[in-house]
């Protein structure tokens, strides 16, 4: 005889109707107890007399729903999640499966599926993590297999903090954590706050607002550090943004922001390390959470509505913030080296771009034309196709290096300011002397391209490195 298993509700109905029939009890009392009508009581009495306990078991028990997803598809989803979509939350995963794999499932199905496999979404709440941890601990106690216990223990550890606590750095300036965060800091438009936080003291050593997360934003933060404290020992930065080498669909070297920033660090002897794990640089990440609850209010009360006003406000605010929250700075344990002079800072925090001399003996940069000039202001001419480097210093001044010689760049206006034929002749002015960096400037061609090659590890289609190609073009121009 087949054993009939009932759930708690079905078992309660069965026992109530069984007692009612055997004792000829009151049907109204039974209806009140079960929360149904007298007509339903009569139906259940009839079913009990005909089928017994079997009547109270749901008819779909053990049957697979018509719209159920087959086991092959379930296994395919699990495999895709393990190997391809492992960092997607369940809502995003449902969209990706439908878009790229042609598998249409709901996020609720995915949630139940993965919870059944003891897998949580990357966006799981702390409460859900605690609940799953307790379930795994119960399973660990119930199982007798050592192998299964080890597997469950690994899952429990993965639910906990995967980034163990570590002590702060011993020296001020030993590690500067840098990142940027987009938020509606002031007004009604989002802006990116570029931030640098010292790991030893937790003090903000640089802060700058920019419309986007850009090299300019981090250069301004770097400039604040150099002018206020000196040269730090090293940076710990976000690998996924401006500090990661990424071609971004363009071959222009000035768009390679990681190479630009890391080359500036190399000139000053600053170590730079990157990570794609936010928790690894928790000091700056937590600082953003603190500032998001405080800074917008301060900016609103100060009447700040523009980027310029916001950056001006930061100078005073950072000092007040550090005085309240940062640890005292022990200058006897500082890793900062002496501040460089303003000229070196200006020339080091530069954007370097590859260009060629055109047929008009000029260089095109930023949609404008420039002519290279000597120190005395007189122009110098090179053959068409000669390779050069254009350098935009931190203060915006432009220079060029051709065959390792440095020159200033004068913009060529689209129109003459005065007509030679129609205006009154003016006295001829002697060329104005230009400032040109000495031969010790940081833009030596061989050093720069050696750094570029080390960062990019890329080759031209014919197998030549871009450095070799540049020299070939320069020598045969």
Image (cartoon, helix red, strand yellow):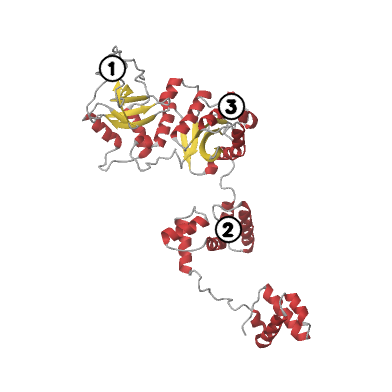
Position above or below: 126 against 256: below
Q: Position of residue 443 (x, y in %)?
A: 35, 26
Toward which corner of the image does residue 131 lie, by quadrant?
A: bottom right
Q: Residue furthest top?
A: 427
Camera-near label (3 vs 1) is 1
Dot 2 corresponds to which residue? 152
Question: Residue 145 at what x, y percent from top left?
Answer: 58, 63
- The mark total stands at 3
**As drawn, which residue projects farthest toward the front?**
422
- Asked if residue 25 shows in the view, the reply is yes
Q: Residues within 10 Å of mark 2 (few under 14, many from 20)?
A: some
Answer with mark 2 or mark 3, whichever residue precedes in sequence.
2
Q: Is residue 476 left or right of residue 416?
A: left
Which of discs 2 and 3 lies nearer the camera? The answer is 3
Residue 119 in the figure: left or right of residue 387:
right
Quarter of the image for the C terminus: give it: top left
Task: Residue at 66%, 85% (x, y): give it.
Answer: 47
Task: Give the Cα distance between marks 2 and 3.
Answer: 52 Å
Residue 453's spot in the image, x, y percent? 34, 36
Q: Identify the residue under disc 3.
A: 316
Task: Say which mark, if any, is on residue 423.
Answer: 1
Residue 434 vs 38, above or below: the answer is: above
Determine the residue positioned at 57% across, 57% down: 150
Label 2 to label 1, Cα distance in Å?
89 Å
Which secondary structure lies at badge 2?
A: helix
Q: Which is more toward the observer, 23 or 3? A: 23
- Distance Cα–Cα, label 3 vs label 1: 52 Å
């Amino acid at each position: 005889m087949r054993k009939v298993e009932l759930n708690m509700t079905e078992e309660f109905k069965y026992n109530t109707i069984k007692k009612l029939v055997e004792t000829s009890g009151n049907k109204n009392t039974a209806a009140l107890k079960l929360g149904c009508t007298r007509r339903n009581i009569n139906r259940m009495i009839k079913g009990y007399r005909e089928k017994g306990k079997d009547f109270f078991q749901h008819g779909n028990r053990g049957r697979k729903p018509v719209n159920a997803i087959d086991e092959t598809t379930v296994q395919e989803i699990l495999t895709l999640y393990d190997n391809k979509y492992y960092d997607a939350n369940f809502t995003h995963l449902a969209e990706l499966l439908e878009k790229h794999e042609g598998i249409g499932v709901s996020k609720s199905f995915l949630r139940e599926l993965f919870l059944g496999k003891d897998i949580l979404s990357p966006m799981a709440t702390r409460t859900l993590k605690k609940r799953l941890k307790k379930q795994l601990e119960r399973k660990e106690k119930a199982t007798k297999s050592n192998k299964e216990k080890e597997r469950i223990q690994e899952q429990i550890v993965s639910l906990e903090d995967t980034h163990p606590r570590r002590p702060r750095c011993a020296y001020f300036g030993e590690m500067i954590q840098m990142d940027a965060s987009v938020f509606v800091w002031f007004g009604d438009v989002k802006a990116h706050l570029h931030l640098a936080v010292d790991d030893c003291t937790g003090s903000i050593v640089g802060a700058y607002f920019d419309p986007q997360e850009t090299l300019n934003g981090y250069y301004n933060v770097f400039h604040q550090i150099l002018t206020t404290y000196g040269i730090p020992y090293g940076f710990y930065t976000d690998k996924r943004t401006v500090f990661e080498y990424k071609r971004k669909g363009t071959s222009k070297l000035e768009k390679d922001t990681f190479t630009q920033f890391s080359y500036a660090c190399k000139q000053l002897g600053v170590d730079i390390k990157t990570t794609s794990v936010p928790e690894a640089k928790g000091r700056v990440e937590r600082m953003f959470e603190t500032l998001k609850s405080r800074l917008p209010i301060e900016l609103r009360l100060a009447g700040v509505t523009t980027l310029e006003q916001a950056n001006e406000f930061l100078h005073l605010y950072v000092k007040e913030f550090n005085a309240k929250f940062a640890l005292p700075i022990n200058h006897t344990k500082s890793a900062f080296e002496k501040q460089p002079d303003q000229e070196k800072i200006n020339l080091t925090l530069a954007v370097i771009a590859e260009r060629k001399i055109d047929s008009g003996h000029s260089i095109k940069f930023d949609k404008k034309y420039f002519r290279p000039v000597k120190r005395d202001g007189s122009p110098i001419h090179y053959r068409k196709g000669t390779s050069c480097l254009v350098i935009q210093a931190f203060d915006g001044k432009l220079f060029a290096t051709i065959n390792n010689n440095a020159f200033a760049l004068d913009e060529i206006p689209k129109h003459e300011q005065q007509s030679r034929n129609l205006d009154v002749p003016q006295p001829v002015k002697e060329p104005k002397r230009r400032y040109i960096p000495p031969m010790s400037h940081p833009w030596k061609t061989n050093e720069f391209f050696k750094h570029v090659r080390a960062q990019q590890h890329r080759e031209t289609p014919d197998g030549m490195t871009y450095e070799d190609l540049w020299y070939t073009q320069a020598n045969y121009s």
